[in-house]
Structures are given as C-alpha cells and as structure tokens.
Amino acid sequence: GRHRALEITSDLITVYILQRQKAGAANATINRELAALKRAFHLAKRARKVEIIPHIALLKEDNARKGFFEPGDFRAMLAHLPDDLKPVVEVAYVTGWRIRSELLTRQWSHIDFRAAWLRLEPGETKNGKGRIFPLTSELRAVLEQQLARTRAIERATGQVVPWVFHRNGEPIRAFRRAWLSACTKAGVPGRIPHDLRRSAVRNLERAGVPRSTAMEMVGHQTESVYRRYAINDETMLREGGEKLAALHQAEREQSPKVLPLNRS
C-alpha cells in the first residue's frame, strides 16, 4: 500500500496477514503475496536501499490435492472428450507425464516404435533431465492409431504434421472447456488434468513396480514428492491386509508342532 519499506515491520506484516485471513484469503494466496514482499526486500537490500529485512514467516499450507481416477471413472470421462483429445489423455493416464509441457510438445521423432520408447529430451522436463517410457501394449495401440490418423490428415492436406497430438494437424493450445464438460458429464466434476499423474503413480504402485523405477518413468526426482502422489486408497489398503493375513497364515502352517516329552 502506501507504507514505505522502512515503515514495514514484522508486527505490521502480522496485522496484514490477519486482515487477509479475515477477508477470506487462503493461506496459499497470502503466502504468494508474502513471498513477493520478501523478494522485494531482498532486492532492496542488494541495491543498498534498506539495511534490515523484517521477519516474514509463511503460513502453513495444506493444499496437496488427493484426486485420482478409478478405471471406470476414467473411461466414463474419456468417452465424453472430443476425439482429438482422447489420445493425449489416454497417454497421460498411462505415463503420468504432464499434458501441457510434456505430451502436447511431443513430435513423431520422439517415438521409437521399433525400440518401443516414448522420449523426453534433456532440458524438456521440469527437472531438466531426459526421460523415456516403455511402449506398453496399451500405449503402443493408442500411438499407432494416432499415427494412422495423422498420416490420413497429411494425405488429405498435403502438409506434414510433426505433432503427435493435434487438432486436424494444428497444435492443441487449449482444452480446459472440453475437460470440464467431460468430467461433469461423467459424474466426476472437480477433477483436474494433474489427477491423471496421480492416477499413473498409483497404478504403478498397484502393479508392484519398484519405486525407484516408477520415479524414473513418471519423472519424480525425490521420493518425498513421489509419496505425495502414491495415494493409498481403500483397495490398496485392503490388498495390503490380505497379503499380511496370507503371510501370517503361511507362518502358522509352517511352524513346527510342539510334542510333549515322553516321561517313560
């Protein structure tokens, strides 16, 4: 506001936080504002405009989303999507790769059908590392169908289409409205595209894929972040209980019988 930097103290910041909370602002929103203020102070100190930076403590955020798609929910949502969006959403559900930055940017040169790999080059990912995903039978089927559709468009237009996912040969720029409509019609409103990433991680966990391998496939650098996505739903917990019960049953069956000593 109208306060000069030298007038802003930790007490004034506390008052600001209380006012924003009273106005209904979420902790995450307030934290972004506080982070901007903190950054401004650090730049001012670097420029020798201020000498002391007030203490700016960020609020606790509990904004980790827990959404994911059960197979039936996913198929229902997929059925209501336009045909040009179905392939990229199917691939996202299998791979867990980010739709906008990691899948819509794929070109046919990034797919090796012979060696059976889908590739992200170094520098294209969030952490800067390259990544490959094996072409499972389901993934291969989707991509081969998309290739056939692309070749048909190329023959009809006489134009080369480098993009794997496209709208009649043109890159897909926006899909939010179609996504919201499909989720609503499928009875799963409120889902977001990033829920496909959580679903892929959970499916890898269910399949028993080693965690280190799954992290490489999906693109998680740290196990702490991966664990946020590996949601334990009721099915997984029930399966865990059944495996534990089977182990205890096997131990009981294998334990030696205790026979009384013969006193004669």
Image (tube, rainbow, N blue to C red):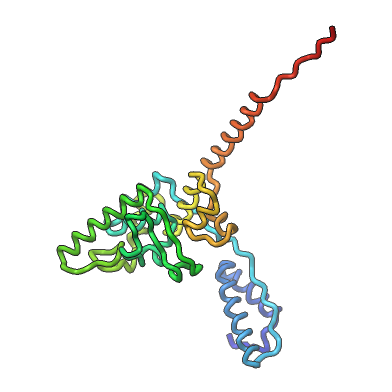
Q: Position of residue 84 (x, y in %)?
A: 28, 59
Decide which of 114, 156 is in the foreground and name it: 114
The residue under the point 34% across, 58% down is 112
Q: Position of residue 57 (x, y in %)?
A: 67, 73
In this rendering, is residue 239 above or below 124?
Answer: above
Q: Is residue 227 left or right of residue 108?
A: right
The residue under the point 23% across, 64% down is 168
Task: State how many labels appear.
Answer: 0
Quadrant in which residue 149 is drawn: bottom left
Q: Which image quadrant: the N terminus?
A: bottom right
- Residue sitting farthest toward the top: 264
In this rendering, is residue 249 above or below 144?
Answer: above
Decide which of 217, 76 is in the foreground and name it: 217
Q: Position of residue 121 (x, y in %)?
A: 42, 67
Q: Position of residue 98 (x, y in %)?
A: 43, 62
Q: Which image quadrant: the C terminus?
A: top right
